[in-house]
Image (tube, rainbow, N blue to C red):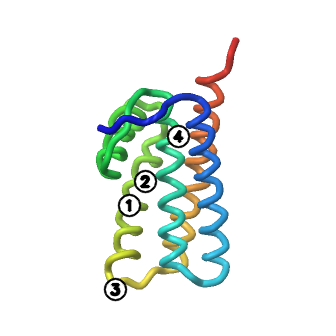
């Protein structure tokens, strides 16, 4: 684990980054840049889930550790839906193939799924952060 700043402001900042990456993914998708869109959709997903984790004093050096912790503590406990965890895992695999497998051919349907996962996770993360940071 690494030392980072935590709290509401950082969570909101990361959520804004997630939204920016989603916008970029959609622009790339609309211009038929599917591999690049997969990459940006993944980072949108990653920033959304790290936004949630900013409410705890925890951070990881590796993406797989961050995703594993999120799935264990937020998906498997029912805080986030199971399909969210599946979508995050798939997004990581597709992003890796898009970035590193020179023979990988991204499909329009798969990329649309990546972007939808990002949209869904941003919405869920935004609601979670709002509920857990509101002052009664």
Q: Earlier in the sequence, mark 4 or mark 3?
A: 4
Q: Which of marks 2 and 3 is nearer the N terminus?
A: 2
The residues tagged by marks 2 and 3 sit, at their Cα atoms, a distance apart of: 22 Å
Q: Mark 2 points at which residue?
A: 88
Judge left or right: residue 15 versus residue 91: right
Residue 45 position within the rendered picture, expressed as x and y whole percent measured from the top left: 51, 53
**Residue drawn at the location 60% of the way across and 31% of the way down:** 129
- Residue 51: mark: 4
Distance from the alpha carbon under mark 3 to that under mark 1: 16 Å
Is the residue under label 3 in contact with that under label 2 (CB below 8 Å)?
A: no
Is the residue under label 3 in contact with that under label 4 (CB below 8 Å)? Answer: no
- Number of on-image labels: 4
Secondary structure beneath label 2 = helix
Q: Residue at x 59, y 23 (%)?
A: 132
Task: Kindly identify which residue carries mark 3.
Answer: 102
Would you call the spot at circle 4 few (<14 residues within 10 Å), some (14-19), or many (20 or more)?
Answer: many
In what element is the residue under mark 3?
loop
**120 relative to 71 in the view: left or right:** right
Going from the N terminus, do you reach mark 4 or mark 1 first? 4
The percent coordinates of residue 116 (x first, y second) are 58, 60
Quick check: marks 2 and 1 in contact, CB under 8 Å?
yes
> Circle 1 — which element?
helix
Disc 2 or disc 4, which is closer to the eye? Answer: 4
Name the mark on residue 92. Answer: 1
| Residue 53 position (above or below residue 100) | above
Identify whether 106 is placed above or below 73.
below
């Amino acid at each position: 684990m690494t030392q980072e700043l935590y709290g509401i402001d950082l969570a909101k900042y990361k959520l804004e980054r997630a939204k920016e990456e989603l916008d970029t993914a959609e622009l790339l998708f609309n211009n038929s840049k599917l591999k690049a869109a997969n990459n940006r959709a993944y980072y949108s997903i990653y920033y959304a889930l790290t936004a949630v984790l900013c409410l705890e004093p925890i951070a990881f050096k590796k993406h797989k550790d961050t995703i594993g912790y999120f799935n264990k503590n937020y998906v498997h406990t029912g805080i986030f839906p199971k399909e969210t965890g599946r979508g995050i895992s798939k997004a990581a695999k597709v992003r890796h193939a898009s970035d590193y497998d020179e023979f990988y051919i991204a499909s329009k349907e798969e990329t649309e799924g990546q972007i939808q996962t990002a949209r869904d996770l941003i919405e869920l993360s935004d609601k979670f952060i709002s509920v857990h940071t509101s002052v009664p």
